């Protein structure tokens, strides 16, 4: 493993700067909320359409993916059928089972990551998939299904980045730990970096929201593995971090695209970028500035090329800041998923008081 000098002039050195005008939530605008259904992902298309997804982590559940309309109302997307899978149905390959993230690409397609792990217990056979939807027609264009060579019994596909120039998609697996590369023309997919330290939870990491440690039923920090993901603007590097971790890594995408690359070759290609903090979402803007959702500080930070970490937004409403997107006007969107308030981290009872919400700010 080597240190990534090209990206950060002060590699592996964390320097924190606070951007004062955004403190206290100034400039943070709520753009969507609901009091009922837990959300994780948001994306905004190049034409300004907004989509939100809801994982099936509770029996209190309605839709997997919705489009948020201009008046704040929502509609199942792409249609009712895709959002109506139920336990016992044999349609997991062609309906959403448990969607974790949605990402709109630069060619006006919507990509939906379905780890098919309802209640995060086990993967529904045949359900794990990546779905491409044509936003011009609002129709599913292609379904990429994954077999046992890609999906492990404890896999949970988490997030995706799509390189439309090279026709590849890259996903994180936060359950088993690892990365998945998908060649979009052939549909062939393969895993990379299984069991490598960079994709695993780090020891002695504390996730604490408003000072309260997030602990599982065993009294320990949940061992969330590779989660946040970002693609450099030129597509040459993929950045990623374990949620229960405090280190950002990157690897050349040329290595990830090579299904013949050995585990040793992949390991040699992993570079440490910076020491950070537990972060769920990552986002890379057109200037290759990396955004991070800071779970422990209810905030959004930005990692610059000179090694500094700026706190852009800090707001008590950002309870478990989760997933990023960027709109055509340059605004950054982020969800507050309240994972820390979930029953599994609070002796079986939800402690949530505020709505699940999506916010935006101008960086």
Image (cartoon, rainbow, N blue to C red):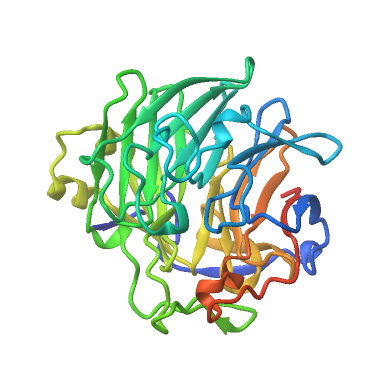
Horizontally, residue 214 falls left or right of residue 334, namely left
- As rendered, which of 278 and 71 lies closer to the eye? 71
| Quadrant in the rendering for residue 71 | top right
Q: What residue lies at 33% left-to-right and 37% top-to-bottom? A: 126
- As rendered, which of 227 and 349 lies closer to the eye? 349
Q: Residue furthest top?
A: 137
Q: What residue lies at 62% left-to-right and 42% top-to-bottom? A: 63
Residue 265 visible in the snapshot: yes
| Quadrant in the rendering for residue 177 | bottom left
Horizontally, residue 284 falls left or right of residue 191, namely right
**Up/down of 349 relative to 282, above or below:** below
Q: How many marks?
A: 0
Q: Position of residue 133 (x, y in %)?
A: 54, 24
Q: Position of residue 30 (x, y in %)?
A: 80, 53
Q: Position of residue 193 (x, y in %)?
A: 24, 50
Q: Position of residue 185 (x, y in %)?
A: 35, 18
Q: What residue lies at 13% left-to-right and 50% top-to-bottom? A: 264
**Up/down of 63 relative to 26, above or below:** above
**Up/down of 359 relative to 83, above or below:** below
Q: Residue furthest right?
A: 71
Residue 235 visible in the snapshot: no
Horizontally, residue 238 falls left or right of residue 288, namely left
Q: Residue furthest front?
A: 88
**Up/down of 130 relative to 311, above or below:** above
Q: Quadrant of the N terminus?
A: bottom left
Q: What residue lies at 47% left-to-right and 39% top-to-bottom? A: 113
């Amino acid at each position: 493993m080597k240190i990534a000098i090209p990206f950060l002039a002060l590699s592996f050195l964390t320097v924190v700067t606070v951007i004062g005008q955004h403190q206290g939530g100034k400039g943070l605008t709520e753009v969507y909320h609901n009091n009922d259904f837990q959300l994780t992902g948001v994306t905004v298309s190049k034409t300004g359409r907004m989509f939100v997804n809801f994982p099936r982590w509770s029996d209190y559940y309605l839709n997997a993916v919705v489009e948020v309309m201009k008046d704040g109302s929502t509609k199942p997307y792409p249609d009712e059928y895709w959002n109506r899978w139920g336990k016992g149905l044999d349609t997991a390959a062609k309906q959403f089972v448990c969607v974790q993230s949605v990402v709109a690409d630069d060619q006006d397609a919507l990509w939906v990551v379905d780890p098919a792990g309802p209640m995060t217990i086990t993967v529904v056979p045949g359900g794990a998939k990546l779905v491409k939807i044509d936003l011009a027609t609002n129709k599913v264009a292609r379904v990429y299904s994954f077999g046992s060579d890609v999906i492990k019994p404890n896999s949970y596909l988490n997030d995706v980045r799509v390189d439309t120039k090279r026709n590849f998609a890259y996903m994180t697996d936060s359950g088993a730990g690892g990365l998945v590369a998908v060649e979009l023309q052939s549909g062939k997919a393969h895993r990379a970096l299984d069991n490598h330290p960079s994709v695993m939870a780090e020891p002695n990491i504390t996730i604490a929201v408003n000072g309260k440690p997030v602990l599982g039923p065993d009294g320990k920090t949940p061992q969330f593995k590779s989660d946040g993901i970002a693609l450099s603007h030129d597509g040459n590097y993929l950045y990623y971090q374990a949620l229960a971790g405090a280190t950002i890594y990157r690897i050349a995408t040329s290595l990830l695209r090579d299904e013949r690359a050995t585990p040793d070759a992949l390991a040699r290609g992993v570079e440490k970028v910076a020491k950070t903090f537990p972060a769920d979402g990552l986002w890379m803007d057109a200037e290759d500035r990396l955004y991070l959702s800071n779970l422990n500080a209810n905030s959004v930070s930005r990692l610059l090329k000179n090694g500094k970490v700026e706190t852009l937004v800090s707001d008590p409403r950002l309870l478990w800041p989760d997933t990023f997107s960027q709109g055509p006007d340059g605004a950054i969107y982020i969800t507050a998923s309240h994972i820390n308030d979930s029953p599994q981290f609070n002796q079986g009872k939800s402690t949530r008081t505020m709505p699940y919400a999506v916010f935006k700010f101008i960086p």
